[in-house]
Image: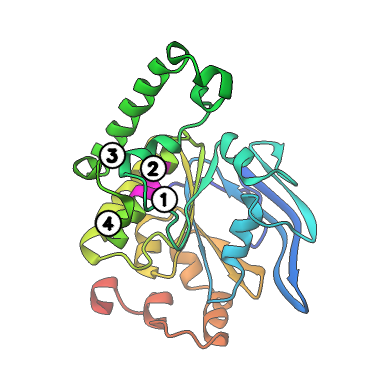
Amino acid sequence: MKSTGLHKGEAVPGAAKVDPIIVIDGVTRTFGGLTAVDVEHLEIPRNAITALIGPNGAGKTTLFNLLTGFDKPDAGTWTFDGKSLHGVPAYRAARMGLVRTFQLTKALGLLTVLENMKLGATKQTGEHFWQSLIPGMWRKQEFDIEDRAMRILEKFKLDAKKDDFAASLSGGQRKLLEMARALMVQPRLVMLDEPMAGVNPALTQSLLDHILDLKDEGMTVLFVEHDMHMVRHIADWVVVMAEGRIVAEGPPDAVMNDPAVIDAYLGAHQEIDLGVVTGRVSAEEAK
């Protein structure tokens, strides 16, 4: 069931949220003469699943990179849970509870699945040189981390692969591993960059279920996606970008019928079923 009461007033670009976890103000990023991101104001609602959609080149991944410390803006500020993230590097943002996955998975291929998981845990005593020389100082924590990793792998049905090298996994399994590894940080906000890209249809439903589970477990989810069926199915709120700007936001059904959204896709000459975007055909008819 979709969440309600996420925003205050009218659902327009920059709409105030009842309880935002991220607040963005005046963030811009240019590459030469190209303005990739120009977001005047945006709030991401807490404990909800928000989809960030838009045509290719709209600036979605660049905005992800800025928010998570993988890139630096030309101007602007943003906060996560009331704390400024301006100038905060990616590893510190992750320690604060903001984690992300990538469109192209970043699993460490020559480490096993379990080793990838354990590497995702933070505040490991054994990472410090002097403490690492005394097994008694880190051994129990190591056991606890491995136990937590195995519980998450079981949930993602990757426990049977724990001793396999990550490089041997299929594309869909690597997506699952990346999402599972992100949970080792015990995050409050999970940002997924095109989680369904390149995934075998057999694993699509599994990924959808895991994203819904994140919300059920009290996490906030922000994801980039092109699949409108998926957006309609799991998103509580949708934000639309075009040419670096926020052109619309609101509940999924309302956004899909917004003329600004239709114009954004038409203007980019996207190969998209506008019947689905505008709600003129059902998802079943569009299959």
Measured in 3D between alpha carbons, the distance from the residue under mark 4 to the one under mark 1, in whole angstroms, is 11 Å
Q: Position of residue 278 (x, y in %)?
A: 43, 77
Pointers 3 and 2 in contact (CB under 8 A)? no
Q: Which residues are magenta?
A: 177-181
Q: Earlier in the sequence, mark 3 or mark 2?
A: 2
Amino acid found under the numbered disc labelled 4? Ser
Q: Which residue is mark 3?
A: 153
Asked if 140 appears above or below 221 in the picture, the reply is: above
Q: Earlier in the sequence, mark 3 or mark 4?
A: 3
Amino acid found under the numbered disc labelled 2? Asn
Outermost top residue: 136
Measured in 3D between alpha carbons, the distance from the residue under mark 2 to the one under mark 4, in whole angstroms, is 13 Å
Q: Earlier in the sequence, mark 2 or mark 4?
A: 2
Pointers 1 and 2 in contact (CB under 8 A)? yes
Q: Which residue is mark 4?
A: 168
Q: Secondary structure at mark 1?
A: loop
Q: Which residue is mark 2?
A: 116
| Residue 17 visible here | yes
Residue neighbourhood size for the residue with mark 3, other residues' Cα within 10 Å, grouped as few (<14), some (14–19), many (≥20): many
Q: Quadrant of residue 196?
A: bottom left
Q: Earlier in the sequence, mark 1 or mark 2?
A: 1
Display coloring? rainbow
Residue neighbourhood size for the residue with mark 1, other residues' Cα within 10 Å, grouped as few (<14), some (14–19), many (≥20): some
User: Magenta includes 58?
Assistant: no
Camera-near label (3 vs 2) is: 2
Locate residue 195 relative to residue 125 in the image: left or right. left
Q: Position of residue 255 (x, y in %)?
A: 50, 67
Q: Where residue 108 is drawn, which disc sits there? A: 1
Which of these two is toward me, 212 or 148? 148
Amino acid found under the numbered disc labelled 1? Leu
Q: Secondary structure at mark 4?
A: helix
